Image (cartoon, grey):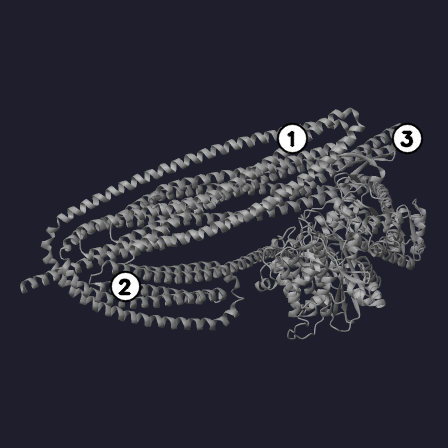
Amino acid sequence: MGDGEMECFGPAAIYLRKPERERIEAQNTPFDAKTAYFVVDADEMYLKGTLQSKEGGKATVKTHSGKTVTVKEDEIFPMNPPKFDKIEDMAMMTHLNEPAVLYNLKERYAAWMIYTYSGLFCVTVNPYKWLPVYDSVVVTGYRGKKRIEAPPHIFSISDNAYQFMLTDRENQSILITGESGAGKTVNTKRVIQYFATIAVSGGAKKQEPVPGKMQGSLEDQIIAANPLLEAYGNAKTVRNDNSSRFGKFIRIHFATTGKLASADIETYLLEKSRVTFQLSAERSYHIFYQLMTGHKPELLEALLITTNPFDYPMISQGEVTVKSINDVEEFIATDTAIDILGFTAEEKIAIYKLTGAVMHHGGMKFKQKQREEQAEPDGTEVADKIAYLMGLNSADMLKALCYPRVKVGNEMVTKGQTVPQVNNAVSALCKSVYEKMFLWMVVRINEMLDTKQPRQFFIGVLDIAGFEIFDFNSLEQLCINFTNEKLQQFFNHHMFVLEQEEYKKEGIEWEFIDFGMDLAACIELIEKPMGIFSILEEECMFPKATDTSFKNKLHDQHLGKSSAFQKPKPAKGKAEAHFSLVHYAGTVDYNIVGWLDKNKDPLNDSVVQLYQKSSVKLLSFLYAAHAGAEAEGGGGKKGGKKKGGSFQTVSALFRENLGKLMTNLRSTHPHFVRCLIPNESKTPGLMENFLVIHQLRCNGVLEGIRICRKGFPSRILYGDFKQRYKVLNASVIPEGQFIDNKKASEKLLGSIDVDHTQYKFGHTKVFFKAGLLGTLEEMRDEKLASLVTMTQALCRGYVMRKEFVKMMERREAIYSIQYNIRSFMNVKHWPWMKLYFKIKPLLKSAETEKEMAAMKENYEKMKEDLTKALAKKKELEEKMVSLLQEKNDLQLQVASESENLSDAEERCEGLIKSKIQLEAKLKETTERLEDEEEINAELTAKKRKLEDECSELKKDIDDLELTLAKVEKEKHATENKVKNLTEEMASQDESIAKLTKEKKALQEAHQQTLDDLQAEEDKVNTLTKSKSKLEQQVDDLEGSLEQEKKLRMDLERAKRKLEGDLKLAQESIMDLENDKQQSEEKIKKKDFEISQFLSKIEDEQSLGAQLQKKIKELQARIEELEEEIEAERAARAKVEKQRADLSRELEEISERLEEAGGATAAQIEMNKKREAEFQKLRRDLEESTLQHEATAAALRKKQADSVAELGEQIDNLQRVKQKLEKEKSEYKMEIDDLSSNMEAVAKAKTNLEKICRTLEDQASELKTKNDELVRQLNDISAQKARLQTENGEFGRQMEEKEALVSQLTRGKQAYTQQIEELKRHIEEEVKAKNALAHAVQSARHDCDLLREQFEEEQEAKAELQRGMSKANSEVAQWRTKYETDAIQRTEELEESKKKLAQRLQDAEESIEAVNSKCASLEKTKQRLQGEVEDLMIDVERANALAANLDKKQRNFDKVLAEWKQKYEEGQAELEGAQKEARSLSTEIFKMKNSYEEALDQLETLKRENKNLQQEISDLTEQLGETGKSIHELEKAKKTVESEKAEIQTALEEAEGTLEHEESKILRVQLELNQVKSEIDRKLAEKDEEIEQIKRNSQRVMDSMQSTLDSEIRSRNDALRVKKKMEGDLNEMEIQLSHANRQAAEAQKQLRNVQGQLKDAQLHLDEAVRGQEDMKEQVAMVERRNNLMQAEIEELRAALEQTERGRKVAEQELVDASERVGLLHSQNTSLINTKKKLEADLVQIQGEVEDSVQEARNAEEKAKKAITDAAMMAEELKKEQDTSAHLERMKKNLEVTVKDLQHRLDEAENLAMKGGKKQLQKLESRVRELESEVEAEQRRGADAVKGVRKYERRVKELTYQTEEDKKNVTRLQDLVDKLQLKVKAYKRQAEEAEEQANTHLSRYRKVQHEMEEAQERADIAESQVNKLRAKSRDAGKGKEVAE
């Protein structure tokens, strides 16, 4: 099958067969069959080499690596010619041996051809990566093809079996064997896939799913059986993550038409022990971990299990997760397979329940009764769960486990069980339930796969483990190896039967050798009577039989009597072996411990009886056929008969199943597949020689080769043999008469000198033994070489003779011409001759004229024909040129289109992957949004609850002092909780710094609260002195109440936050405790390993003692070593002691922490009793907390260092142990090496001493760190004292403010003159009040209009949604068309979604602003009772609501516009649009709710305003008595106004500064975006340039390669011409000139490549310069950011100053200052975000520098390749010069030969005269010239070798170029990653910009609210003045009345 025929396999063709060009090159490769050998090597097993010599049974071989070795002759193996390289059928090789098979497999595996034939075998090697050789195209390519017509493949085996079944009407079987991880299960799946594809049953109509019936087609069910069987039968092992732990024989039945009819499955040797025990690197069956994924929460509840595998000890002894397996996806596949296979819902839940019960069994615990050996349950919780899942009674089950009923004689008695016996019984029950359930599932699957359709034939697929040879081999290994022994016997017999049929058909007489008998000894030893299985079953019948008695019987029966049974050799370091069996794959040592129990597989009959009565039908069904002791005892003879029938051992059941399997296989035509593991590390492309040879021996491939070598593996048809080998002795076959091909072959072989016993003649073919055909090939090559040489000599002689004849003819002609010319010269002047010359032309002149005219016409006609022909020729040439140009253009276009297509496919795959990832992210974001909405609802409920609490607090005004006391107590309790929290979190390194900062922040807030409280108290005292009336006291109490409510709310928030932190801390402490336990377990494991190491060291000491007795000279040396070992033990004891000291120190630390906790509790009590000493105790407690934290951190670090030290010491001990083992092995080999090992031990000891010294240094460093922590604590205390002094300074400033107030009080009389003006203002305010009332009414009217407009917008929204639903159908039609556009716009959708989320957040913030406004209005109401103008507040609120509604309306308009635009732009965005519509609907719903809540709040405020108006009317009467306080209030007002003006100016300055900074931030962001876009553009340009350079380089290299190939071909042609004909000088000159022109073109192309590479270098330099410019720009941006950060820090200080000023003002100003502080914190978070972005930018720069460095490395490699190419070109030029020199010499020789020929002619003329001496001289000269010609031939051969050398160099350069391409690809990937990161940073910058905008809007909103508050305060003051004026008028009126 050529390359054209291989195109039917598509992309898989290169993985199936090597291309035709490679096959031709292999045939032309020179090869010396006499010297090419494989040689045995200790490291690589076999190496290729060249035989140097053979003598004395030894052979000297020089390997290809240059090493020369001398080995025995039987350790070298002949190599096959190169044409057999990567051969598809290894049985066709000339030399069949192990290294030939190994290297053929290795070379094919390196080319990813994983399937290879070996005779009847198909050998497959696991590639450990996905190969495109199983696609539907490949299935179609193999369908209907014979084995010889297609490359090796599992599909070829499957199709041949299918075709044989149809043609031969015979059942078929495919036997797939191999080790775990070799790919058996995968190949089994491929076989089933192939049959399900080519033999689809068809015609089945779809039916409704019925429980218990088939769900899906038969093909689906056959394929679906795999996931279920893998879930319950596959597990992770050391070699394979998905290893089948059972064997299976799948029979696929076909109807007479070849369509699928049904299927069934038989299983063998399920590994039950894995249910209860796993190694550390393995895990149990997949189903356990699938159930615990939590994919189905209802299953977790039904099975009473958790998602933590470590809660179940039985399945968590090894690993619990596998990287290559997704348990969630596998569980979905398993659950789906159960449904497809037709299990009912009841059966499904029963399977899961029994699986869960098996998991729970591992948690059952039993303890020993006191003073008894009887076991009793240690808790019944797990037992209750098991009983519930299995439908049992818990008490009965525990009783049956601890007190089982056994049969003694004819009575049933209760037997007591020990704890180990109970645990063993539980394990046996687990394994039994799991096995029976697995077998039941197989039966149910077979029932479902049985379609009851007529079936005629079947194809069976056997997937079973291969031969196993482990260090510890038990009964399971014996069963597996016995199975493989039987299968190998079956293969040997089958193979020989086929050979025998071939020999019978050909009539060859050959002695019958039954190769199956080779294995008979081992098989009979195992299965025959008194064999191993027979003795094992006999021992199981005796109650008192033990492992020892079983071993003794085996040794007595077989040791020394059977060659296959041997006594094992004791091996040091391996498990004990009791006997050895000689298998075909090697000798295996078996350990018989526990075989009797495994074979009997005993169960607790009492528990089994409970199972039979279980309410779970599946469990009772599984054990319905089990006959227990009670049933056996009650039936007399029948009972005894039943017992004998029911007592079936594991080995007997195994033999029965194996017998059935072998019967099935014997009735079929078998096909064999052998799977191999290439390496242990799962590395693709790597093959370990020893591992592969071991498997080839184990799975019978080499055994098949051995059988093949016994027969006649090579065979050729007689006609082909005669045609090919007739040249060996052509005289035997007479010419000119007919002779039969068979007789001709017989005569031919009879006349040749070969071993005539090595071949046989059949009817149509001649058969050869292995190796003879290679000998005939060598003889044929030698004969052809001699014939060619003779032919060349004859040709040269003939040519020279012909030339000599021509020369003689030319000489005679010259003589004739000379004679005629002399005669003419004599008569030329004779007169008659002159007359004759004149008359002669005139005689025929007329005829001549006619002839001339005819010739002229003919000439003209031919001239016209010539012009036409030339024109036509020119036209055709032009057309040919154009066609050639079109052909080249089309070829280029096809190549570019194919490249574009591949690139588009890759991009499409990447986009699909990114789409899947983005959809997953979108889903996560949606879920997160829903969670946030739930959290928002919870916060709203909490807010309402807090409002209710505030209303309750309003009622408790009279109990203010009690509330204050409670607040103080809660405050103290909170502080105590903080202190307890800091003590409990001492064990967390990362959390200490964070909590310390939070604690300091709380302390500062508390101190600030105390300062505010002190200021308010001073203010209350001054007001108390100036005011003596009850209203003033009420005002003071209200102000203090307001402060305390705020303080309480703050404390409540702090309390909740601290409680949450406490919970987090407790959880983290629990995690740390778990980590501690795990580390303790690891330490225990390390201790156990150390004990093992010590035991091994003791063994080595005993061995040293034996050596000491044998070697007396080294006794003193060995004693010194033992003393050093004792010293190491002492060091280990010291380490153990240090570890114990550390554990004691850890316990002391924990006790100290508990004592500290107690001390803290005591201090809490003292705080309650002594509140006066609060400050002092707090300082002491803080100091103790810091000290505890420092101590805990130091001890924790010390503990970690000690653990690390222990690990290092353990590693050192392991190294010492390895060195001692090395010394022990060297004692046996060489005694002199003891001194060097002693020095190594001494070095290890010095290393330990160095480690001790380093540990002491670390301890001193820890002490210094502790001192530093103490100094830091002192610094903190000093800082605290400094803060207290600053607090005092603030107090003095407050006193100065009070003095200023008193001065203003003294100047109050100055304001009496302004009272009259205030009266006029009052009148004006009354008018304004009326106007505001009208404004309120108009605002309400506007609100109604807005409400109607909002409803209209909602209706428009609904219409839009209806339009969207209508458009969804159109979207579905256009979806496929615009799918790529949707993928590209996914990122835009993400950004729009983020914007919508931002709008949602803004809406929530507006709601919070409305709520804060409500709270501020309530505070204003309480603070300004007695003020009249509350309607102004309502108007302001209405205006604010109207503005918010307008803003919302605009937002809705924007959203609607965006939706319309999206609807018009792309209808393919269906899914994203639906999600956005849902988010918009939720947003509208929230907006509507917020709007309704705002309206409700407006109504409530109106009602409260009415109540306040009533209260105002009451207070106006009281205000008449407060006239005296007006002047004081006016002074206070002036003070507040002045302070307000100052704060206003400060705020304006801060706002200006902030706006300036924001503009700077915007400019910087714009610059950063420009820089990023510039970077992206430059990267894109560089990518295009690199891609262009890659394409140009590739074209140049392709042209170079083609040029070099043509050069090589021309050189080969020249060599062949030189060997054939040395006389064809003209052809040689033509070829040489052609080669020179090609070489010149190659040099030109090389120069072009060098120029292009220089251009690439220039481009790279420009890219580097661009990167440096970008670095400078980034540095400038960083400097600007630093300046901005400094300015923001100054702004922060200014804002803090304004905060301190605002504290003195009204409560509204305090709130505003707090909001400004919030804005400041958000700005600082924005700064942190900026720093993070800058850090990411620095990281990008580092990555860019790495990419630049890689580019430079690639550039250096390219330069190196250029220099190599230049050197190669120079060498090529030298070789061409040499060739030209040779050609010149050749020409000279030819001239010489001609000269000699001329001399020879003259010599022949002179020979007649007798010159013999001269003839001898000439002959000697001829001989000299011939020697010179031979020398020139040798030089030509050397030149050919040089050309081959350069060809190899060219190949190396080609490989290096491919590596450079890979590097460029890797750089491209890196650039793509950087681009993705740049995009991510762009998105982060945009988010930061949005956050800055939101913060700016918040700041402006706060400023606006503050201005509104100021205005309201001014209005209130004017109203108060008016009321005062009214009260004065009323007072004057009363005085006038009096």
Q: Are marks 2 and 3 in contact (CB under 8 Å)?
A: no
Residue 1437's disc is: 2
Instruction: Tell me the CA gap for discs 2 and 1.
Output: 84 Å
Q: Position of residue 1359 (x, y in %)?
A: 41, 73
Q: CA distance from mark 3 to mark 1?
A: 101 Å
Q: Position of residue 274 (x, y in %)?
A: 70, 54
Image side of residue 169 versus residue 1170, left or right? right
Q: Nearer the viewer, mark 2 or mark 3?
A: 2
Q: Residues within 10 Å of mark 1 (few under 14, many from 20)?
A: some
Residue at the disc numbered 1:
1244
> Considering only order in the chain, which callout, 1 or 3, is on the residue closer to the N terminus?
1
* Quadrant of res 248: bottom right
Q: Amino acid at mark 3?
A: Lys
How crowded pointer 2 is (Cα within 10 Å; few <14, some 14-19, many 20+) is rated as some
Q: Nearer the viewer, residue 1747 or 1297?
A: 1297
Q: Quadrant where the N terminus lies?
A: bottom right
Residue 836 at least partly seen: no
What residue would you read off at disc 3? 1809
Looking at the image, which is closer to me, 1342 or 1527? Answer: 1527
